Structures are given as structure tokens and as C-alpha cells.
């Protein structure tokens, strides 16, 4: 028997369900932010020497390095920056495209400024994320992927770190509405470079507003308790 209701993770997923099954009742329940983990103080974590230079700006991508993830766009954007002498880029994670990305990095002459760290323990990951000026949410430019609800985004919000993202769906609207980061044009290295340059030159007060916007989303919109209550209310209404 076909389910009479569904709980998709984004409005885009909801639209996809209703386009095929308009009779189904839906309730969007996004992924929750793990504030208890990523919101903790990471002051005890020490940056490695190669990213410890005073004034250095650090960008972090963490998550899958797979076919769906447009991590090559980050590298192209980094290579297109006008001045990256005091900027470092770190990839944390693994996947089928890691080898190709490392080859791309070498071909662009970026190996001194870009590091692939593989999978890292969560305790160390928290330190990297909270040391970043921004993290990335990047997917291939496909309608289905624009409906995604990626854990890396919610972890960044929980840590109070702005995002740079390239999708065209609900996340783009969220960034526009909340001010939690910067949207870029997919497959446009200059757009990615401009976003990274903006994050490097942003005034501390403006960056803090982005950080506060990200933290605010974690505290309310994607609060685990609030989302669980919404889900339970729907379950009770159906019983």
C-alpha cells in the first residue's frame, strides 16, 4: 500500500514527491544541526605549523569527494584568485574523485597551498571547521542535487561558520534570506574566486554577522529538538 504521507528533507524533495503523488501529505523535516558537537569550544586544538601563520585565511571543504560533489570548482576558483599568498585550502574526506582532484591540484600548481587530509577524527574535524573563514557546499549543477540537504552545511551552521555554495535550489534561497554565506554561480571559476576573495577581505564585523546568521539557523530553524517536535506532532495528528 502506498504511503499516505512523507517527510522529505527539503522543499525541493517535497516538490518532487508531490509532482508524482499529489495526494500524499508531506512535512519537510530538514537535517538537524549538531550544536552539541560542532558548537563546542575548539580553542584547545592547535593548527599545524603549515597553517599557523598569523593572518592566514583558511578555507575548509569536508565531506565526500565523490562524483556528485563539484570539488573541482573549488580548485578552479582558488587558482583564479588574484592573491592567495596568505590563503590555505584544506580538503577533509575521501571518495572516488580524490585522486583526480589531487592531480588537478598538482596541474594547477597549488600543492603548496592546498592539502588533502583524508578522513579525520570528529574531534580534529571540529578544530578545522571552526578555524575556517568559510566552508563549501558544492554539487554538480543538476536539478536533483539542488534539492539536497547535506550534513556538511548543518555542521558548518552548528560551528557558526559561513558557507560558500553553488546550488540553485533551496540552499541558495536560504543564503539569500539569512545572510549565512555567499552564493556562487556553478562552473564559474571567477564567481568562486570572487567569493573566496570577499571572505578573505571582509571586515570582522561583517564576517561576524554571517557567523551569527549561521548560528541562528542552527539554534532555531535546524534545531534538533524543534524538528523532532514537529515530526511528533505530525505523527500524533495521523494517529
Image: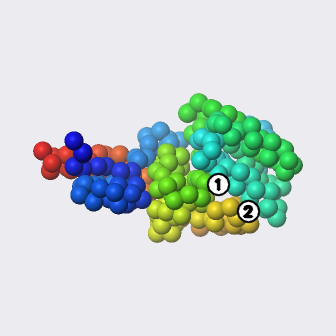
Decide if residue 236 is on the left or right side of residue 155. left
Q: Secondary structure at mark 1?
A: loop
Residue behind mark 1: 133
| Residue drawn 59% across the image and 53% down it | 139
Q: Position of residue 96 (x, y in %)?
A: 66, 37
The crowd level at tag 1 (other Cα within 10 Å; few <14, some 14-19, many 20+) is many
| CA distance for labels 1 and 2 | 19 Å
Please give left or right for residue 44 compared with residue 20 in the image.
Answer: right
The N terminus sits in image quarter: top left
Color encoding of the figure = rainbow
Q: Position of residue 69 (x, y in %)?
A: 61, 48
- Residue 179 or residue 11, whichever sits in front: 11
Query: Label 2 crowding class (10 Å Cα cut-off): few <14, some 14-19, many 20+?
Result: many
In the image, residue 83 sits, relative to residue 57, either above or below, namely below
Is residue 71 among the parts visible in the rendering? yes
- Sequence order check: which comes first, mark 1 or mark 2? 1
Q: Quadrant of residue 199?
A: bottom right
Residue 211 makes an appearance in the image: no
Residue 64 is drawn in which quadrant? top right
Which SS class for mark 2? helix
Q: Position of residue 49 (x, y in %)?
A: 78, 38
Which residue bears the numbered disc 2? 189
100 or 17, which is in the foreground? 17
Q: Establish if 8 lies above or below 65.
A: below
Q: Position of residue 124 (x, y in %)?
A: 61, 34
Q: Which mark is residue 228?
A: none
Q: Residue furthest left?
A: 239
Q: Residue at 83% across / 55% down in the picture? A: 85
Which residue is pictured at 29% across the width and 49% down the height? Answer: 6
Amino acid at each position: 500500500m502506498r504511503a499516505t504521507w512523507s517527510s522529505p528533507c527539503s522543499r525541493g524533495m517535497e516538490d518532487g514527491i508531490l509532482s508524482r503523488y499529489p495526494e500524499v501529505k508531506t512535512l519537510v523535516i530538514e537535517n538537524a544541526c549538531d550544536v552539541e558537537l560542532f558548537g563546542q569550544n575548539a580553542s584547545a586544538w592547535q593548527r599545524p605549523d603549515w597553517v599557523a601563520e598569523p593572518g592566514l585565511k583558511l578555507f575548509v571543504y569536508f565531506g565526500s569527494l565523490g562524483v556528485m560533489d563539484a570539488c573541482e570548482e573549488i580548485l578552479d576558483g582558488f587558482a583564479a584568485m588574484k592573491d592567495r599568498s596568505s590563503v590555505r585550502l584544506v580538503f577533509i574526506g575521501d571518495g572516488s574523485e580524490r585522486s583526480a582532484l589531487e592531480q588537478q591540484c598538482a596541474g594547477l600548481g597549488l600543492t603548496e597551498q592546498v592539502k588533502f587530509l583524508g578522513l579525520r577524527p570528529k574531534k580534529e574535524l571540529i578544530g578545522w571547521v571552526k578555524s575556517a573563514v568559510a566552508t563549501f557546499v558544492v554539487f554538480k549543477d543538476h536539478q536533483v542535487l539542488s534539492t539536497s540537504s547535506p550534513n556538511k552545511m548543518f555542521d558548518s551552521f552548528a560551528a557558526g561558520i559561513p558557507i560558500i555554495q553553488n546550488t540553485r535550489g533551496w540552499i541558495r534561497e536560504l543564503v539569500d534570506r539569512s545572510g549565512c554565506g555567499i552564493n556562487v554561480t556553478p562552473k564559474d571559476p571567477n564567481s568562486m574566486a570572487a567569493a573566496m576573495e570577499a571572505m578573505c577581505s571582509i571586515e570582522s564585523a561583517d564576517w561576524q554577522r554571517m557567523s551569527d546568521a549561521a548560528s541562528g539557523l542552527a539554534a532555531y530553524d535546524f534545531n534538533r529538538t524543534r524538528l523532532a517536535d514537529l515530526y511528533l506532532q505530525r505523527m500524533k495528528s495521523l494517529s
